[in-house]
Image (cartoon, rainbow, N blue to C red):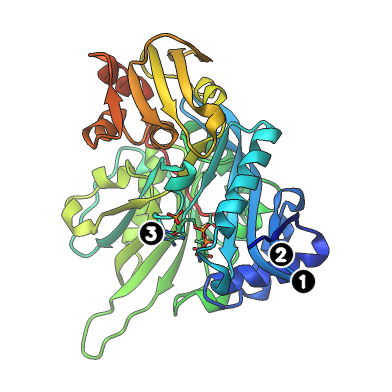
Amino acid sequence: MSYDIRVLEPADWDRWFSTLELAFGGIAETAEVRELDRAVTEYARSIGVWDGDRVIGTAGAFSFQLTVPGGSLVPTAGVTMVGVSPVHRRRGVLTAMMRRQLDDVRALGEPLAVLTASEPAIYGRFGYGVASQKLSAEVETARVALSVPPGTDDVRLRLAAPADVLDECEALYARLVPGRPGMIARLPGWERRMVADPAEDREGASPLQCVVAERAGETVGFARYRIKPVWRPGSVPEGEVRLDDLEALDPAAYAALWRFLFGIDLTSRIVAGDRPVDDAFQHLVSDARRCGLRLRDGLYLRPVEVGAALEARTYAAEVDVVLAVEDTFCPWNTGRWRLSGDAKGASCERTTDPAELALSVREIGSAYLGGCSLDSLAAAGRVRELREGALVRASAAFASVRAPWLPHGF
Ligand SMILES: CC(=O)SCCNC(=O)CCNC(=O)[C@H](O)C(C)(C)COP(=O)(O)OP(=O)(O)OC[C@H]1O[C@@H](n2cnc3c(N)ncnc32)[C@H](O)[C@@H]1OP(=O)(O)O
């Protein structure tokens, strides 16, 4: 069956978005969220698949700048709003959209594409690998003690409506972006998404609240959270602190924010859904086992141009390796590439020299931000070492001191 794939026109946005809502189960977004999504839609890079006068498939992309190991911000397509009408599935509509989209991304010169997946089984076939994980926690605050570093008492905390302090929180966030691979510089209009707070999505919890950490009049951190009161008959108060976001510039500000969250009266638990794997609160607590820690796939990454992608980051150790890359969906990447790099920069060019490691573009995507080691992929048979010693050296070079993490979906 053949369908028509077209660039989205503003006049068709409502129909297009309604197809997306249907693909996700048919629950309409609130008017507030709908308008925020409309405002950030990049029409020229959003596509709709049409069956006659009906939209049956949707896919969009954002023009992100993604932090990579070494701290550079790299132009990256943020793939989003993917959906196919329930009666048109498993006929290749998504595959056709991925084809069109990756060709477009390549034409725009963006070496990387990223996404967060509704289901992990979908995107590997298109060359996306899991590049970061997210840590969730359910901390039993009544049973876990915190030990905080010197200087924590010097941090002053101030409560504020999230929208009232948005500018200062966003300025702080922007300072942190280059420091952690996987973070994305916020595009205009995105800041409002961080404090969107539809009552329908609160699941019985309070409106979003914000605490700002200050030292000598300077904002040094913030946390956004909700309180979900829990009163059981005959029991003590067992409310939950639902942590949305916590960012800080230094250890004392970070610890002061956690100490505040731990101490909120009438609560006995902090629930955090999306923290970095190396989040430091794990080292402040007396009992990590009572923190209910779990890992989940986070950001998926696809090198669209392997050479440019591998040149865009730096390497933790000197590396000089020939990679035999396989890429069935974007065959322009297939072949042998010599990667030479160190902490200052890298080059990656085609070569006819013998290959030392063999892998597909998906493994490069997984290892790219330094969150998944080539060595661990090799243990699963997904990277093959063709010259002894190449794997250890390349694994060390691809590593990142700070775990990759994206603090929000898109
Ligand atoms: C970045 C984001 O926006 S993530 C959001 C993704 N969207 C959703 O999850 C909404 C609900 N789901 C959908 O709309 C659709 O099922 C989609 C978009 C996931 C898939 O669309 P389809 O048009 O059915 O995919 P298509 O027919 O091109 O399938 C291609 C291949 O992927 C497989 N596939 C598709 N969806 C899934 C899935 N959810 N789980 C496992 N495999 C899948 C197909 O079986 C097919 O495999 P094959 O090549 O071996 O035959």
Per the model, the C-alpha gap separating discs 1 and 3 is 40 Å
For label 3, the crowd category at 10 Å Cα-Cα, with few meaning under 14, some 14 to 19 and many 20 or more, is some
Quadrant where the N terminus is found in the figure = bottom right
Q: Are marks 2 and 1 in contact (CB under 8 Å)?
A: yes
Label disc, if present, on residue 140 of the rendered structure: none
Q: Which of marks 2 and 3 precedes in the sequence?
A: 2
Label disc, if present, on residue 53 of the rendered structure: 1
Q: To which quarter of the image does residue 105 belong?
A: top right
Residue drawn 56% across the image and 78% down it: 27
Q: Which of marks 3 and 1 precedes in the sequence?
A: 1
Q: Position of residue 256 (x, y in %)?
A: 38, 49
Residue drawn 29% across the image and 15% down it: 390
Q: Where is residue 12 in the image (x, y as percent from the top left)?
A: 78, 66
Camera-side mark, 3 or 2: 2
Label 1: element kind: loop
**Residue type at mark 1?**
Asp
In the displayed structure, would residue 281 be above or below residue 200?
A: above
Q: Where is residue 164 in the image (x, y as percent from the top left)?
A: 64, 59
Residue drawn 62% across the image and 52% down it: 97
Residue matched to label 2: 50
Label disc, if present, on residue 273 of the rendered structure: 3
**Residue type at mark 3?**
Gly
Q: Residue furthest top?
A: 353
Task: Describe residue 204's horizontal placement relative to residue 97 as left or right.
Answer: left
Task: Describe residue 352's horizontal placement relative to residue 170 as left or right.
Answer: left
Per the model, the C-alpha gap separating discs 2 and 1 is 6 Å
Q: Position of residue 176 (x, y in %)?
A: 52, 37
Quadrant where the C terminus is found in the figure = bottom right
**Residue type at mark 2?**
Trp
Task: Describe residue 271's horizontal placement relative to residue 289 as left or right.
Answer: right
Please indicate, yes or no, whether residue 217 appears anywhere in the rendered image: no
